[in-house]
Image (tube, rainbow, N blue to C red):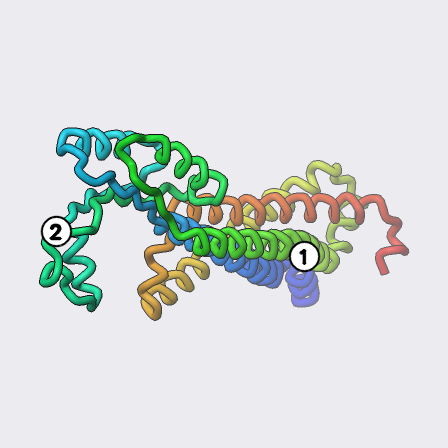
Amino acid sequence: MAQLGKGSAKRSTPSYFMAIVGVSLVLFLLGLLGWIVINANRLGENIRENVEVQIYVRQNLSPKDSAALVQFVSAQPYVRSYEYITKEMARKQFVGTGNDDFMSVLEQNPLPASVDFRVRSEYANADSLNKIKADFAQNIAVDEVKYNKKLVSNVDDWIRKTSLILLIVTLVISIAVIILIDNTIRLAMFSNRFLIKTMQMVGATRWFIARPMDRRAIINGAISGVIATAAIIGIIFASETWLPEIKALRDNMLLAAMFAVMILLGICISFISTHRSVVKYLKMKLDDLY
């Protein structure tokens, strides 16, 4: 008789192991997608920040005016980095690319000096670059302004298409994650429906019944989020070890925010799903539980 009671108590104890595992797996998939989205955004920013604008200085410009132009360029908010290329540096770069040194046949260096700068990612689009080009074209110290229009156009198209695809995939996965976690928790609570009803039949209040299960749901959600976070961190470090180049794409601030969201999502959905299930079984008749 004592053994039977002991076995019944064991069976009536809520089992949360599979719920934790299920929620962890779903949060892991969501976190993996989030990591891919973060890397894609960082890659787009890196590509944009490699767009270079070349400002060719007018011939015979005085050193004072050249220095004033360089200072003006460096003060612009869209300039990430810049370099002043003298006529001699331009000649060395020309020869360094495999071309013949024209100074053997020419008396003067025909290559102009230039100010080359890379723009910040938010300005690396066709509209902003066209405005920058138009502004510098009006400067009397500037002879010509150039940048790779085809590269900018291709980058804009790639980022636009990639962002749209990732947005759609993220929305679909997010909805699926919420539904899967909710179903996982409800399935775990289904096995505890008789325990919930028994507590109600012996006079326990709704709050008394729901409180420990809600508290446990919060703990389980946090555990699931931490497990999923640890798994994502492991994937990140393994990927960076296998492919060191992607380490440059890591954004620790965004990753920390994503991990916080994962843990918070696990807690919120686990709590809401558990509480809904408890209230549902409390409202049901005993015969309907079978």
At label 2, the amino acid type is Gln
Q: Which residue is mark 1?
A: 176
Q: CA distance from mark 1 to mark 2?
A: 69 Å
Q: Going from the N terminus, do you reach mark 1 or mark 2 first?
A: 2
Disc 2 element: loop
Q: Nearer the viewer, residue 95 or 83?
A: 95
Residue 229: give its label.
none
In the rendered view, does 27 fall on the left or right side of 78? right
Disc 1 element: helix
In the rendered view, does 281 fall on the left or right side of 125? right
Residue 224 in sight from this viewpoint = no
Q: Residues within 10 Å of mark 2 (few under 14, many from 20)?
A: few
Q: Which residue is mark 2?
A: 108
Quadrant of the rendered structure where residue 169 is? Answer: bottom right
Residue 157, x across and y down, in percent = 54, 54
Name the residue at 34% across, 68% down.
Answer: 243
Report the mark closest to the observer, 1 or 2: 2
Residue 20, x across and y down, in percent = 57, 58
Q: Nearer the viewer, residue 181 or 124?
A: 124
Name the residue at 68% across, 52% down.
Answer: 175
Whether 12 is drawn above or below 55: the answer is below
At label 1, the amino acid type is Ala
